[in-house]
Image (tube, grey):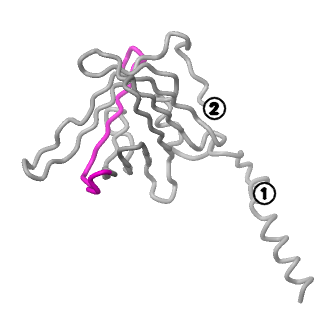
Amino acid sequence: MKPFLAASLFALAATPASVSAQTGIPPGCDGLEHRGDFDFWVGEWDVFAANGQLAGTNSIQKTQSGCLIEERWSGSQGSSGVSLNYYDPLTQAWRQVWMSASVYIDYSGGLNDDGAMELEGEIFYHSQGNRLPFRGIWTPNADGSVTQHFTQYDAVSDRWNTWFTGHYVRRETESNTHSGE
């Protein structure tokens, strides 16, 4: 029985590599449809609020052989946060999970007809313990900048209110191209 079990475990362990070698599927997510939909956001950014003031900086990097986009936010008033972004082949949608000291956001979606990344889900406020519907839209602009617009649903007024609007400008130390890896 033990030799059969060992042979079975070996066969299971070898299957993904042998399937990959036989089909020519490259490692990572290179062959995954929609993998590059959010690449326009990758880079080093200065982020300005709607009033033109510097809101903070954001580092957006592709990791895990291109399968994951990691965000590291540093607000000009001392706030910080991290998000993980990925295309989920099981749900066929992009997903972002954001965590900071004050909020948790989990939402999903994809590119809209205008080529902007549009995600919808919920925001959870740690201190208040409440969760509310939340949306985010990242729009690539012709000049290489990105506009980020967040809205939160207010059940009392039955309206989506602006939560934050940011204008992403590539940091001067970075060239206007990004490798995506």
Q: Say whether residue 140 is magenta.
A: yes
| Residue 99 image position (x, y, % from top left) | 43, 45
Above or below, 136 relative to 76:
below
**Label 1: which secondary element:** helix
Instruction: Find residue 67 and report its image quarter.
Output: top right
Residue 124 relative to residue 159: left or right? right
| Residue 94 image position (x, y, % from top left) | 44, 47
User: Which residue is rendered at x = 17% and y = 39% of the image?
Assistant: 161
- Pick whichever, 77 or 73, lies toward us: 77
Three-letter code, disc 2: Glu
Quarter of the picture containing the C terminus is: top right
Q: Say whether residue 80 is magenta.
A: no
User: Which residue is rendered at x = 41% and y = 17% of the image?
Assistant: 169
Name the residue furthest left. Answer: 157
Residue 121 relative to residue 8: left or right? left
Classed neighbour count for the residue bearing mark 1: other residues with Cα under 10 Å, few (<14), some (14–19), many (≥20): few
> Whole-Å distance between the Cαs marked 1 and 2?
23 Å
Residue 58 relative to residue 3: left or right? left
| Residue 36 image position (x, y, % from top left) | 52, 36
User: Which residue is rendered at x = 34% and y = 41% of the image?
Assistant: 118
Name the residue furthest top. Answer: 172
Name the residue furthest right. Answer: 3
Residue tagged 2: 181
| Span shown in magenta | 127-145
Three-letter code, disc 1: Ala
Quarter of the picture containing the N terminus is: bottom right
Residue tagged 1: 17
Instruction: Find residue 92 and report its image quarter.
Output: bottom left
| Residue 91 image position (x, y, % from top left) | 45, 58
- Pick whichever, 37 or 147, lies toward us: 147
